[in-house]
Amino acid sequence: MLLLVLLALLLLFCSLDVWYFLRGAQVFVQTLFQPRIWDILAEQSFDGMVLPHDLDYMGHMNNSRYLRECDFARFHHCMRNGLFMGSRKLGARMVVGASTIRYRRSLAFREAFEIRTKVVGWDDKAFYLEQRFVSKRDGFVSAVMLCRQNVVRSSPETLIEFICKKKIECPEFPEDLKHWISYISASSQALRAESGLEDKNK
């Protein structure tokens, strides 16, 4: 019987990223016991530490782990400010439409850090978030990520009004975000032209 259980667990771990789902469940439960953050533009912090399974061959945090940690930090952020539950009630979904990350200094084994997440702005289709990896050792910003969170079957403005019960003015986009949005638009147009989609829509 014990052998069957061990084989079942082995099969489960081989076919699914079990730790990802367990971590997601942990973040969900954790946020249920934390106070609600009513300011949709407030920066939130999410703590982390570089563990053995995060390491690459150089002994630093693996590049892909930064994106994974950002995933959990965004979930934590959207749970606490009401965006996640609000989107569920409206029958909408939020999905990542684009992201870019700039690495400034590697995070070492057992180094504690926090991810500071904030909504930088929004348009008629998506929220734009900035996420910073800040070392707790010296406060250095080790990496910066920009993320476009698309809102499907609704709009950011509708979602904000539903959560906050009032209209909130979108902040002015910083210059780096404007350049990044221009890049996304140019990339999208180039790929559409490459696939012939633009000709079909004329």
Image (cartoon, grey):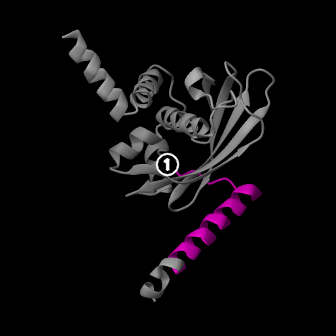
Percent across and percent down for residue 152 are 41, 56
What residue appears at the point 28 percent right and 16 percent down from the top-left corner?
Answer: 6
Percent across and percent down for residue 150 are 49, 55
Mark 1: which secondary structure? helix
Three-letter amino acid code of the residue under disc 1: Ile
What residue appears at the point 40 percent right and 25 percent down from the top-left corner?
Answer: 22
How many residues crowd around disc 1 within 10 Å: few (fewer than 14), some, or many (20 or more)? some
Image quarter of residue 55: top right
Q: Is residue 85 visible?
A: yes
As drawn, is 41 to the left or to the right of 34? right
Q: What range of the chain is rendered magenta?
A: 167-193
Farthest-out residue, left: 1
Image quarter of residue 23: top left
Relative to 141, does residue 200 appear above or below in the rendering?
below
Q: Which residue is mark 1?
A: 160
Quadrant holding the N terminus: top left
What residue appears at the point 66 percent right and 34 percent down from the top-left corner?
Answer: 116
What residue appears at the point 61 percent right and 24 percent down from the top-left corner?
Answer: 48
